[in-house]
């Protein structure tokens, strides 16, 4: 692809040769700084798959710079925390875990400790930079493509490097990737978010929405499929608005269909889908797909129209239920999952009951449930929030109880079915494996670990809450 292709209002750049030169220079410097036989990096990732995908690119660059990877900080020469800012709890964990590295750095001063990711919003980045003088490198999500250069300066100049860039008009291609999995993999199709839901920090830390060029996504999908990936998840904060920044405005349904047309034995998933842009065309594409999993993760956040409006979600309960009913009608055995926020500012028990009634009506297979966490800089953080934390926790537990009942009922209805299952891991219990159905439901079964990474037909024999038990057919 030529450099600086204009894609509508966003440009797509190939990572510069200069960055590869920095990777080479880092490898030279590390020969004198490493503690063991080879330079070792420890990367810890918090938050969503977007961050996981970013960490895989950081690992790709570090691998070219000669690093091996470790699961613990003990023997690491380079330690990086890729942070998440979505809720206070996520941030607290980062503060606690970075703080714990102080004594390691004192013992081995040549170690480089770095922070990146979504916590690099101005006020937090400043706080981290000040609170942790032993952290030598801090950079935000927009500087990922310049990571080799930043690390080189940290190593070569012996000064702390602090970089917060706001460059969200570009998509960077050609960054090397070292994927964590060999049969399950992430494929980013777009970055950023334009939706500004009033509770959410993501648009502030990830910048405006920008899509990757379709031909490059298709190339990467082909490479993954021929490398043996069996479960590929397309990533974006709102995949349904894919293509809007591209010159020829392809839709997400078109992209999905074109990837689905690639031959091979694999499943195709995507997340996250925003209900406001979820088209019938998309649901028809899933229904008619060959490889597309029969799973739709469609976060509704709240069942109350009043709260949805205050959240700036741009759909109401009726529109949500219309999409869900269309999906149920078209996609045989569709598995629906969602995200929910409990205790948004101003939410009453009456509003919350609307959320409960919606989950009863839809019968989700599983839910990701969160208690509202105020984020500095978002409009919701300034709204009146009279309900106590105890009360919100009570509602939250009520929600979990209702969902447990629904999930158990749904799982029980699958007993005696034969399902195609991707075997993913050992459960840790003697001779037991764990896998997932196309609808993303966990199935446990007896089998040999050589089956990990393969598709198997499994007869469902039992349902335990939201987990299925089965036998190889
Ligand atoms: N782009 C996705 C969501 C990404 S964040 C979408 O719009 O569907 C994942 C989930 O975190 C959100 O769906 C929401 O349920 C939750 N979340 C985001 N901000 C939050 C906050 N301030 N407090 C609690 N939960 C939050
Ligand atoms: Fe956050 Fe809303 Fe964007 Fe999702 S769509 S990332 S919840 S602002
Ligand atoms: Fe967290 Fe950033 Fe994802 S805030 S949820 S890691 S986009």
Image (cartoon, rainbow, N blue to C red):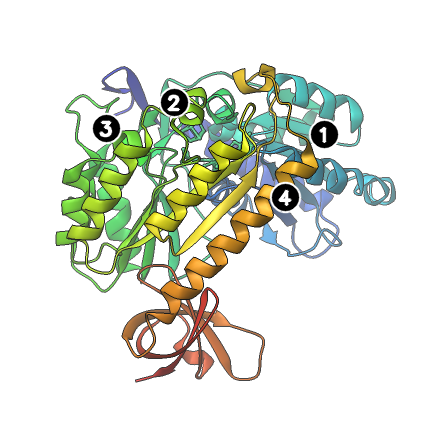
Q: Nearer the viewer, residue 213 or 91?
A: 91
Could you tell me how far apart the alpha carbons at marks 4 and 1 are, in whole angstroms?
43 Å
Residue 453, relative to residue 368: is it above or below? below
Secondary element at image label 4: helix
* Tag nearer the camera, 2 or 3: 2
Can you identify the residue that label 1 sits on?
136
Whichever of callouts 2 and 3 sits on the residue coming sooner in the sequence is 2
Rate crowding at label 4 as few (under 14), some (14 to 19) or many (20 or more) other CA atoms within 10 Å.
Answer: few
**Going 60% across and 34% down the picture, which residue do you hit?**
87
Q: Nearer the viewer, residue 203 or 287?
A: 287
Mark number displayed over residue 235:
none
Can you identify the residue that label 3 sits on?
243
Could you tell me how far apart the alpha carbons at marks 3 and 1 are, in whole angstroms?
38 Å
- How far from the left and from the top, in percent, is residue 52? 49, 44
Could you tell me how far apart the alpha carbons at marks 2 and 1 are, in whole angstroms?
34 Å
**Going 21% across and 48% down the picture, which residue do you hit?**
327
Which quadrant holds residue 81? top right
């Amino acid at each position: 692809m030529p450099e600086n292709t204009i894609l509508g209002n966003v440009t797509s750049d190939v990572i510069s040769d200069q960055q590869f030169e920095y990777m080479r220079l880092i490898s030279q410097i590390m020969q004198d700084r490493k503690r063991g036989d080879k330079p070792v990096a420890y990367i810890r990732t918090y938050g969503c798959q977007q961050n996981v995908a970013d960490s895989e690119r950081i690992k790709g660059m570090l691998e070219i710079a000669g690093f091996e990877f470790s699961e613990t900080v003990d023997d690491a020469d380079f330690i990086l925390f890729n942070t998440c800012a979505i809720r206070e709890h996520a941030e607290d964990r980062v503060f606690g875990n970075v703080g714990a590295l102080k004594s390691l750095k004192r013992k081995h001063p040549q170690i480089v400790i770095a922070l990146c990711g979504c916590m690099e919003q101005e006020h937090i980045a400043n706080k981290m930079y000040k609170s942790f003088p032993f952290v030598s490198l801090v950079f935000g999500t927009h500087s990922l493509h310049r990571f080799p250069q930043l690390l080189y300066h940290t190593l070569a100049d012996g000064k702390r490097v602090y970089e917060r860039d706001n460059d969200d008009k570009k998509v960077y291609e050609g960054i090397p990737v070292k994927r964590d999995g060999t049969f399950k993999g992430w494929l980013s199709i777009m970055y950023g978010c334009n939706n500004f839901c009033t509770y959410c920090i993501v648009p502030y830390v990830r910048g405006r929405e920008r899509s990757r060029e379709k031909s490059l996504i298709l190339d990467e999908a082909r490479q993954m499929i021929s490398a043996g990936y069996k479960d590929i998840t397309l990533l974006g904060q709102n995949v349904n608005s894919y293509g809007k920044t591209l010159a020829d405005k392809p839709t997400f349904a078109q992209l999905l269909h074109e990837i689905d047309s690639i031959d091979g034995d694999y499943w195709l998933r995507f997340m996250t889908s925003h209900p406001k842009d979820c088209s019938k065309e998309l649901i028809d594409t899933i229904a008619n797909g060959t490889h597309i999993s029969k799973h739709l993760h469609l976060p509704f956040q709240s069942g109350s129209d009043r709260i949805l409006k205050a959240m700036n979600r741009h759909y109401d309960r009726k529109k949500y239920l219309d999409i869900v009913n269309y999906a149920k009608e078209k996609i045989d055995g569709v598995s629906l999952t969602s995200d929910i926020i409990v205790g948004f500012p101003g939410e009453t028990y009456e509003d919350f009951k609307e959320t409960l009634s919606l989950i009863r009506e839809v019968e989700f297979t599983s839910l990701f449930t969160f208690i509202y966490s105020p984020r500095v800089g978002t409009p919701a953080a300034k709204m009146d929030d009279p309900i106590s934390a105890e009360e919100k926790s009570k509602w939250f537990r009520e929600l979990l109880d209702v969902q447990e009942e629904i999930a158990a009922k749904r799982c029980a209805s699958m007993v005696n079915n034969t399902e195609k299952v991707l075997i993913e891991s050992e459960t840790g219990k003697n001779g037991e494996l764990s896998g997932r159905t196309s609808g993303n439901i966990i199935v446990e079964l007896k089998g040999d670990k050589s089956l990990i990474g393969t598709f198997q037909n499994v007869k469902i024999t039992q349902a335990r809450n939201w987990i299925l038990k089965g036998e190889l057919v």
